[in-house]
Image (cartoon, rainbow, N blue to C red):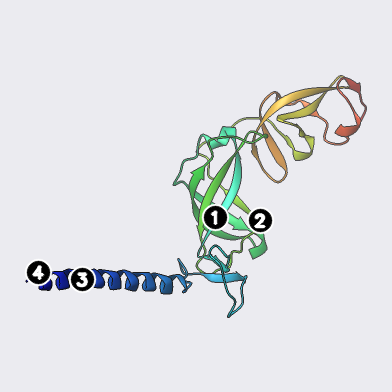
């Protein structure tokens, strides 16, 4: 009886060893097979067929472009009116101004040097027409218009974290620090530091200084 019990224990130990070896072999086989973690398109391949690889070797770059992230920067006066989940319409100039609806997925909690906040918008790309690196413009509907002055983009002087303009009074240019709001391809809103009707310098700002006399 004792001999039989020892044989059973020995057989059980051999079975466990065989099961462990089988598990290790299956894992090695799985590690030898490269599987895509998601459906997509291979944009770059870094190895050739038959090449020996070591753990951590980069094999391919896999791209899923069924959804695209659009990144934009919003001024501090506008970002307070945005929230995650808000709808945005994005127009891509390279695609003849074609519009793509999207939703805001992330709003940065920290501003950059120009007091703008990074906002991420997710766009659906079912036809795969959108490509990474394209420039686009976002349209966000504001509830109420603001009665604030605006100046041409060329009038703004960016100096570190400051935004400034030269205001002309009695033929003298005064350098004034302002805060900017919404921007367009042609003009910039001034939310503080400038009054409606103020004359600003839009050309040659780099050739003058504060309290310089100028003429039209």
Circle 1 residue: 69
Circle 3 residue: 10
**Nearer the observer, 26 or 13:** 13
Q: Quadrant of the C terminus?
A: top right
Earlier residue among tags 4 and 2: 4
Circle 4 residue: 2
Task: Work out how far the residue at label 4 is from the one at label 2, CA to CA, in angstroms.
Answer: 81 Å
Task: Work out how far the residue at label 2 is from the one at label 1, CA to CA, in angstroms.
Answer: 12 Å
Mark 4 vs mark 1: in front: 4
Earlier residue among tags 3 and 2: 3
The secondary element bearing badge 2 is classed as loop
The disc at residue 148 is: none
The disc at residue 135 is: 2
**Nearer the observer, 132 or 99:** 132
Residue 71 rendering spot, x and y as whole percentages = 59, 49
Characterize the local packing of mark 1: few (<14), some (14-19) or many (20 or more) Cα atoms within 10 angstroms: some
């Amino acid at each position: 009886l004792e001999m039989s019990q020892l044989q059973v224990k020995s057989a059980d130990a051999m079975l466990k060893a065989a099961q462990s070896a089988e598990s290790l072999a299956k894992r090695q086989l799985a590690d030898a097979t490269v599987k895509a973690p998601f459906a997509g398109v291979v944009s770059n391949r870094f190895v050739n067929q038959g090449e020996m690889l070591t753990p951590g070797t980069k094999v391919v770059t896999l791209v899923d472009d069924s959804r695209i992230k659009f990144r934009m920067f919003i001024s501090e006066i506008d970002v307070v009116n945005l929230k995650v989940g808000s709808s945005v319409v994005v127009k891509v100039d390279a695609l003849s101004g074609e519009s793509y609806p999207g939703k805001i997925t992330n709003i940065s909690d920290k501003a950059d040097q120009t007091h703008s906040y990074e906002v991420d918008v997710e766009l659906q790309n079912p036809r795969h027409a959108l490509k990474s690196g394209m420039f686009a413009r976002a349209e966000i509907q504001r509830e109420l218009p603001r009665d604030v002055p605006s100046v041409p983009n060329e009038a703004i002087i960016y100096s570190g974290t400051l935004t400034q303009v030269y205001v002309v009074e009695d033929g003298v240019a005064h350098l004034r620090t302002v805060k900017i709001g919404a921007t367009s391809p042609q003009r910039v809103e001034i939310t503080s530091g400038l009054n409606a009707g103020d004359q600003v310098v839009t050309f040659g700002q780099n050739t003058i200084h504060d309290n310089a006399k100028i003429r039209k």
